[in-house]
Image (cartoon, rainbow, N blue to C red):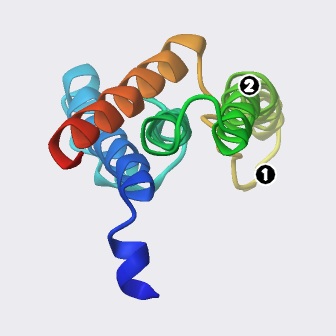
């Protein structure tokens, strides 16, 4: 059973896309800030979207291996659409709310010595970040399919 999981090309395609997206975040951040931030390997948000890379890679690999006219491919596309919509819509708005709340805490702290923990502001993705993740996932699935078929 574990061997089946390890040899599942659909899962591997998604995980390769996700891993590449997480790894790419570190040098992209370095280019912008000139600081290495290794915690980005394990955090959500940023460019490219690892969520988008994972679900788009799994979805395309499902279509390539199982067929584009199957119910399982249709389901994988629907799940990918929901995840990407959530990443760019709901989670993005939650990040904007966190940014606003953090600014309010900073304002209060300037008049009063409040020591409150700030909220993470990078929860979601911009449409460009989601698109970058999607393209990375699709390319990962296509590359692995070309090598393993």
Give the image location of residue 71, x and y in percent. Answer: 73, 40
Q: Is residue 32 above or below residue 121?
A: above
Determine whether 27 is above or below 43 in the image: above
> Which of 4 and 133 lies nearest the eye of the viewer?
4
In which quadrant of the rendered image does the C terminus lie? top left
Residue 104 picture location, percent across and down: 83, 30
The residue located at (51%, 44%) in the rendering is 66
Residue on which disc 2 sits: 85
Tell me what residue is drawn at x 27 percent, y 20 percent. 32
Say whether disc 1 or disc 2 marks the residue closer to the N-terminus.
Answer: 2
* Cα–Cα gap, marks 1 and 2: 36 Å
Secondary-structure class at tag 2: helix
The residue depicted at 36 percent of the width and 48 percent of the height is 13
Q: Residue placed at 51% from the left, 43% from the top?
A: 62
In the image shown, does 49 or 65 lie closer to the viewer?
A: 65
Q: Which residue is mark 1?
A: 114
Image quadrant where residue 5 sits:
bottom left
Which is more toward the observer, 110 or 141?
Answer: 141
- Few, some or many C-alpha atoms within 10 Å of disc 2 (few <14, some 14-19, many ≥20)? some
Q: Specify the quadrant of the image occupied by residue 108.
A: top right
Q: Is residue 41 left or right of residue 58?
A: left
């Amino acid at each position: 059973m574990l061997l089946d999981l390890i040899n599942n090309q659909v899962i591997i395609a998604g995980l390769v896309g996700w891993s590449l997206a997480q790894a790419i975040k570190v040098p992209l951040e370095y280019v912008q800030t000139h600081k290495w931030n290794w915690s980005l390997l394990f955090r959500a948000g940023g460019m490219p979207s690892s969520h988008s890379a994972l679900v788009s890679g799994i979805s395309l690999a499902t279509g390539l291996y199982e067929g584009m006219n199957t119910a399982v491919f249709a389901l994988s596309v629907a799940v990918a659409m929901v995840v990407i919509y959530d990443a760019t819509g709901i989670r993005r708005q939650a990040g904007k709310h966190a940014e606003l709340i953090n600014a309010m805490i900073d304002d209060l702290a300037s008049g009063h010595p409040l020591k409150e923990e700030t909220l993470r502001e990078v929860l979601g993705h911009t449409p460009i970040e989601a698109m970058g993740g999607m393209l990375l996932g699709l390319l990962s699935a296509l590359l692995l399919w070309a090598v393993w078929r």
